[in-house]
């Protein structure tokens, strides 16, 4: 965020979060694209806040981002408990959908990077059918060898996209964007995690009532219990200890 930017931003567990609604966020992104200068976006959830405590590089990358949204009702609830209430949750999957629609309307060029080849190509085909005026600058799967990375960065830079969506795991996607945004010069680059899997229909999203009540994580756990157990019931439990510690600090 520039020195002249007056967007409201709160602090939580060492990480910054912009206090914006979905519409505020979309208007901010519109300004980024109009400027033509590179901007990196990140969403913050319980898992990322916990990881950032142990990984100073990840925490710095998050705090250096031009736009930081809260993706997760527990983060919104925690902000209220700490006396720094966020306006609302801005879920990455919802923001992706809104930006694809807006890109079709405004003629913005989109690049998709990540997931398996069949998934990313399906997302491209589905959205091309849904939004006939949507312009794709390119797409590529999320699997590559270290020696291929430079060529991928150049491919994205040459595509001259307005928006780049990166669907690879954390913290790899944050590190990739942090390292190469200046080279790729994408006006708006966003890590979207498993959003391509949802968009392609491979993973079903939780019912709206579970999203609103903060139980989307539990629905995700029910879909892949073996894979998600460690994250939700072991690693992310540290969040509550961190929350209590911060709540006890003088405000």
Image: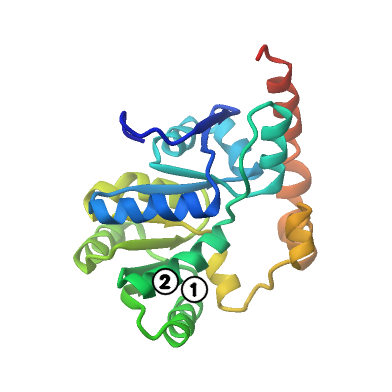
Q: Quadrant of residue 147?
A: bottom left
Labels 2 & 1 near each other (Cβ < 8 A): yes
Taking the spot 39% from the left edge, 86% from the top edge, the residue there is 132
Taking the spot 56% from the left edge, 74% from the top edge, the residue there is 199
User: Quick one: quadrant of the N terminus?
Assistant: top left
The spot of residue 214 in percent (x, y) is 76, 52
Query: Spatial distance from mark 2 to mark 1, Cα to Cα?
Result: 5 Å
Which residue lies most toward the left here? 158
Is residue 184 visible from the viewing direction of this image? Answer: yes
The answer to whether residue 25 is left or right of residue 202 is left
The answer to whether residue 72 is left or right of residue 2 is right
Numbered disc 1: secondary structure:
loop
The spot of residue 52 in percent (x, y) is 55, 35
Q: In the rendered image, which residue does mark 2 sit on? A: 141
Q: In the rendered image, which residue does mark 1 sit on? A: 116
Which residue lies most toward the top here? 250
The spot of residue 22 in percent (x, y) is 54, 54
Q: Nearer the viewer, residue 146 or 114?
A: 114
């Amino acid at each position: 965020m520039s020195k002249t930017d007056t967007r409201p931003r709160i602090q939580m567990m060492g990480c910054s979060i912009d206090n914006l609604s979905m519409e505020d966020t979309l208007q901010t992104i519109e300004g980024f694209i109009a400027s033509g200068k590179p901007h990196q976006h990140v969403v913050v959830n319980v898992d990322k806040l916990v990881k950032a405590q142990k990984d100073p590089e990840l925490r710095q990358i998050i705090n250096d981002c031009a736009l930081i949204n809260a993706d997760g009702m527990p983060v919104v609830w925690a902000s209220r408990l700490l006396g720094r209430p966020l306006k609302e949750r801005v879920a990455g999957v919802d923001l992706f959908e809104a930006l694809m629609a807006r890109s079709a309307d405004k003629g913005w060029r989109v690049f998709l990077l990540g997931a398996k080849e069949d998934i990313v190509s399906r997302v491209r085909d589905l959205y091309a059918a849904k939004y006939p005026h949507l312009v794709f600058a390119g797409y590529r799967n999320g699997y590559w060898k270290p020696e291929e990375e430079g060529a991928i960065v150049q491919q994205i830079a040459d595509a001259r996209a307005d928006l780049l969506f990166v669907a690879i795991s954390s913290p790899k996607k944050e590190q990739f964007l942090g390292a190469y945004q200046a080279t790729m010069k994408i006006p708006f680059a966003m890590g979207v995690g498993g959003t391509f899997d949802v968009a392609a229909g491979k993973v079903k999203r939780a019912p709206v009532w579970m999203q609103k009540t903060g139980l989307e994580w539990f629905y995700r756990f029910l879909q892949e219990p073996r894979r998600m157990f460690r994250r939700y019931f072991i690693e992310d439990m540290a969040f509550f200890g961190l929350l209590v510690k911060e709540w006890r600090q003088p405000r």
